[in-house]
Image (cartoon, helix red, strand yellow):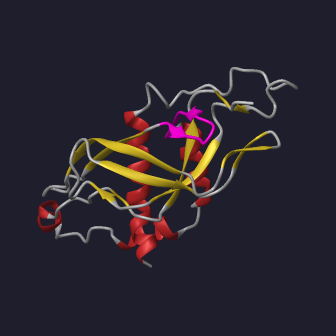
Amino acid sequence: MQTLRRLPTLLAFTLACALCLAGRAGAIEHATTPIDDETRDSLVAAGTLVHVAMLQTVSSAHCHKGETFNFKVLDDVKAGSRLAIPAGTVGTGKVTECRPAHGGRQDGLLHIEFDPINLSDTTQVAVGITHDSLVADANAKNGTGPALEDIANMMVPGFFILDFLRKGDDVTLAAGAPFHIAVTEDAFLSQ
């Protein structure tokens, strides 16, 4: 039940990250390098989805700009038939903007940036939240739970003033919560 309550917050966080990165990562084109016999087993193409989870909770309630975090890759990512990013690979990132929720129903603000994933062959794979990664997360969570929660939280007429004084929601990305990021630039594994 707690997961269903936090789902709108996770989706809001994801949308906030997408809006923050809209100019840079929101319109990422898919791989610019053609996949052929030479590149098939060495190219990790832009747009490739990477399933990850945070290793610690990051929340607008108590984070600071510049704070770092770690995440873990949950599923193997392949370049053709070759393992490119093994499950269990740990990556890092940092908070680029953070503001806690306030009264007047002002929600918290949390923007994060992912550092390139460093592979054992010294390849660096640039990753971030993209339109495609947002769509993958929305499709994975397309049940009726969030809609029902929104209906249950509707304001009762006559309580507008009390509702207005209520604090907004903090944006929290919980440890262990799975989501998707995407490769933002073509990366080539060393032979």
- The spot of residue 139 in percent (x, y) is 62, 54
Residues 41 and 28: in front is: 41
Q: Left or right? Give the position of 176 relative to 161.
A: right
The magenta stretch spans residue 180: no
The magenta stretch spans residue 117: yes
- The spot of residue 86 in percent (x, y) is 65, 51
Q: Residue furthest bottom?
A: 1
- The spot of residue 167 in percent (x, y) is 17, 62
Q: Left or right? Give the position of 117 relative to 186.
A: left
Residues 86 and 110: in front is: 86
Residue shown at 23% from the left, 53% from the top: 63
Seen in the picture, residue 164 relative to 1 is either above or below; the reply is above
Which quarter of the image is occupied by the C terminus? top right
Residue shown at 41% from the left, 64% from the top: 175
Q: How many marks?
A: 0
Seen in the picture, residue 165 relative to 31 is either above or below; the reply is below
Q: Quadrant location of residue 93?
A: top left
Residue shown at 69% from the left, 30% from the top: 190
Residue shown at 30% from the left, 47% from the top: 110
- The spot of residue 176 in percent (x, y) is 47, 65
Which quarter of the image is occupied by the N terminus? bottom left
Q: Left or right? Give the position of 118 relative to 63.
A: right
Q: Left or right? Give the position of 164 relative to 191.
A: left
Residues 67 and 122: in front is: 122
The span picked out in magenta is 116-129
